[in-house]
Amino acid sequence: MDTVEASLNPDRAVPYAVDASSMSGVAHLQHLPGHIYPQVGQWKKAVDINIDAAHILQR
């Protein structure tokens, strides 16, 4: 995801973002989609995914 977030086609990473965010319990994997979602206009998902990652770190 990091390699395509600044590319002309960040949407290529969306399927991987969905997979990563399903790995609950691992804060960094939970957070990674937060790099892609804003690039494709999915602002609420970006915020929500980062909040979820923060909650994992607080456990």
Image (cartoon, rainbow, N blue to C red):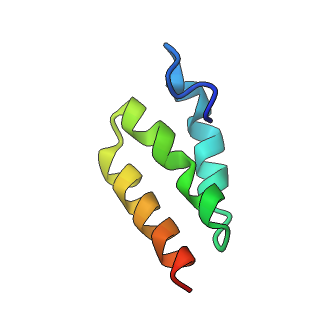
Give the left or right position of residue 32, taking residue 20 as reference.
left
Which image quadrant is residue 3 in?
Answer: top right
Q: Residue furthest front?
A: 58
Is 2 drawn above or below residue 30 in the view shown?
A: above
The N terminus: image quadrant: top right
Determine the residue positioned at 59% across, 25% down.
Answer: 4
Is 48 drawn above or below residue 38 in the view shown?
A: below
Residue 10 on image: x %, y %:
52, 25
Is 53 drawn above or below residue 46 in the view shown?
A: below
Give the left or right position of residue 23, taking residue 44 as reference.
right
Residue 24 on image: x %, y %:
64, 70
Determine the residue positioned at 33% across, 35% down.
Answer: 41
Which image quadrant is residue 29 in?
Answer: bottom right
Residue 38 on image: x %, y %:
37, 38
Give the left or right position of residue 26, taking residue 55 as reference.
right
Q: Residue furthest bottom?
A: 59
